DNA sequence: TCTCATTCAGAATACGTATTCTTAACGACG
DNA sequence: CGTCGTTAAGAATACGTATTCTGAATGAGA
């Protein structure tokens, strides 16, 4: 059977309350008794039961993250692995843990959120992939549930959020291609309802005279099909892709058409994932400091939970850096 | 404030016990009352508190997964993303959730396991990357804690485990290269203490006359360095790499030396990750049916937890399939 | 010496639920 | 008409912890 505070109390010949106090580091307990209790705890390998603690403290010490992705497609995009890893890393060494769920579609995602917060399984949520008018946010605010958004929240000021400067990032990527002498630069966009798509598209448009935009789902496969369309219809000589995975789709399409990179086609991606090094010559990509964003978000979220600061409003913008590699350096050729 | 069974009871003019019974679908409660209570629950949007439930039922409905990986290196290898995604997918639609942790080294991993099970945060664990004599397994068995191993357990019969046929997989990959006319086939192995390394090495050795093995850490970078050593010292004309990520390291090294794939060098990886399609011509890889393995493991684990079958012993071996792509087809050239 | 403040630890309670124990009502059967 | 079995729901309890409430002991100050 499992050893409880009751057992420790009995063996130490003190009350259960005292054991609890020792555990909490309460200064009011006598040194002699404290040491005795600690010794008993140690010899009996005692650890408090997190289930009882959760009930009593009304806190599970779990952070929820619900990704939206089709079954079996998470591994396509290292971005999600980065995200997950960064969250867990940020939580390491703290009393907090990650509760991870993946939903196949928006409806499922909503019901999972609902379940998580209404059953009180998690103490707070990290939101990613925000949409233009995000239903999740409204619900969470209504329920006064702690959450932090990783994404654009300029139109919803009453919340905690951190975002990339996606406008600037896309602008920078596009200008870079222009500087390299590319003439007809297209933008391979993601789903149109996402704020990240809108922001990057705007940045792209601001840097180009004759914008050429095509929307596509995430993933190399969809991107490849979209790239094929672009090549068929418009023959661009450079493509800014929404992320590295989609850039890989572009590269696959280019290979099939014997288009040489970077000579015939310049390519830039986003996220600076490990994929960039797997491309011959390297894939130019915008580093968005996802790790820093996640760390900020987690710190904020824990603060919100512990200070009960649900109504506060901290927002931050993370800088970005263009990592120039072979896929966009035409001048060398 | 949050609505509890007590509130539902008061409003429905029944006792809290009855509400609990209605929730559990207890047949002994009268139909009229049941409907009344259900209606009140519905209008008040009631959901049971998972924290109280965890304490009372002694069950958190959380499955733990602790990966061992250096900080920030999880995204290098799609294998982990696959693993995580498959676990979460297998849990979707059940009352179970995933609690994910990542440890930088073995010591940290052990302390996380210890914490998870002794505080009763999770009800069971999925173990991956088993070592030859795995301390984790001994501890868990000692504590009679539910777990399922994804890995080789032939030397530890008293547990639930599922594994690939790694011997056969490596043998198959090696023979394939031989059949394609490669003469000097090397094996780029992973850490030597892992059972998966040992099994694949054995399979490789069984298929080759003059074995040529080099050990390396996981990840493209380490693999590239190891591959450079191989090229310097032994000039192999084909390499079987422990996984696709390491195969990418090999390919990077080959590119730097202007070795043409598959003409000058044949390459085979493992896991059949999305990386395979990102290589020009495609990377040949062994599909290990990770999804099926994970599904089996989760089903088993949930059974073990719910049937309290900690002492049972179910084991299974998953088949594999060689996905032949351009990186190993010399005959076409 | 008496009073009062202070310190420390035990007793009691609450967190929200599931379940066992108890009791009331009712019908059947002798 | 009384007894007993059966059914249904309320009362009570336990899960393990944190915390408030209470009381005993100690020491200081008058």
Image (cartoon, coloured by chain):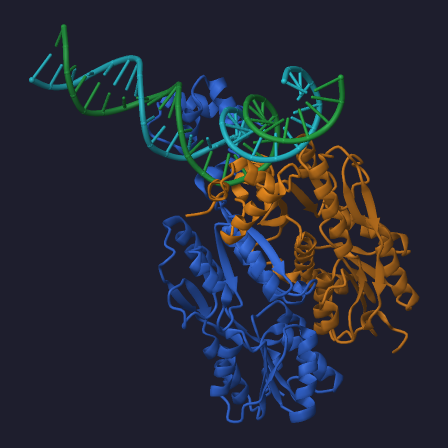
Chain colours: A orange, B blue, C cyan, D green
Residue that appears at 59% across and 77% down: B190
Task: Judge left or right: residue B54 versus residue A178.
Answer: left
Percent position of residue A47, x then y: 54, 48
Task: Judge left or right: residue A165 versus residue A61.
Answer: right
The answer to whether A86 is drawn above or below residue A180 in the figure is above
Residue that appears at 78% across and 46% down: A162
Q: Quadrant of the N terminus of chain B?
A: top right
Q: Give the mark count.
A: 0
Does the rendering let one see residue A157? yes
Residue that appears at 75% across and 32% down: A311
The answer to whether A315 is drawn above or below residue B241 in the figure is above
Residues A192 and A115: in front is A115
Percent position of residue A12, x then y: 50, 43
Task: Judge left or right: residue B286 versus residue A167.
Answer: left
On the image, which quarter does residue B102 sit in?
A: bottom right
Does the rendering let one see residue A107? no
Residues B94 and C2: in front is C2
Residue that appears at 75% across and 83% down: B256
Residues A33 and B41: in front is A33
Percent position of residue A219, x then y: 67, 59
Percent position of residue B74, x then y: 65, 63
Q: Quadrant of the C terminus of chain B?
A: bottom right
């Amino acid at each position: 059977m499992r050893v409880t505070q009751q057992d420790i109390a009995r063996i130490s010949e003190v009350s259960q309350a005292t054991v609890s106090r020792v555990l909490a580091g309460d200064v009011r307990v006598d040194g002699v008794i404290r040491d005795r209790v600690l010794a008993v705890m140690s010899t009996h390998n005692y650890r408090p039961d997190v289930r009882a603690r959760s009930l009593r403290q009304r806190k599970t010490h779990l952070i929820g993250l619900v990704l939206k992705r089709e079954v079996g497609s998470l591994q396509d995009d290292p971005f999600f692995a980065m995200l997950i890893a960064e969250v867990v890393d940020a939580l390491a060494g703290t009393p907090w843990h990650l509760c991870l769920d993946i939903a196949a579609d928006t409806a499922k995602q909503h019901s999972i959120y609902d379940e998580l917060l209404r059953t009180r399984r998690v103490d707070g949520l990290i939101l990613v992939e925000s949409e233009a008018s995000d239903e999740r946010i409204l619900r969470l605010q209504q329920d006064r549930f702690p959450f932090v958004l990783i994404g654009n929240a300029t139109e919803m000021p009453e919340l905690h959020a951190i975002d990339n400067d996606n406008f600037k990032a896309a602008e920078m990527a596009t200008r870079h291609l222009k500087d390299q002498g590319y003439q007809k630069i297209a933008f391979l966009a993601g789903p149109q309802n996402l704020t990240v798509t809108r922001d990057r598209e705007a940045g792209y448009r601001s840097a180009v005279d004759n914008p050429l935009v095509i929307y596509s789902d995430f993933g190399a496969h969809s991107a490849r099909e979209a790239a094929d369309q672009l090549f068929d219809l418009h023959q661009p000589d450079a493509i800014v892709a929404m992320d590295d995975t989609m850039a890989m789709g572009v590269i696959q399409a280019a290979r099939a058409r014997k288009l040489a990179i970077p000579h015939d086609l310049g390519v830039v991606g986003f996220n600076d994932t490990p994929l960039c090094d797997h491309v011959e010559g390297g894939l130019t990509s915008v580093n968005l400091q996802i790790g820093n964003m996640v760390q900020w978000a987690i710190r904020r979220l824990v603060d919100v939970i512990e200070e009960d600061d649900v109504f506060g409003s901290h927002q931050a913008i993370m800088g970005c850096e263009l990592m120039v590699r072979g896929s966009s350096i035409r001048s060398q050729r």
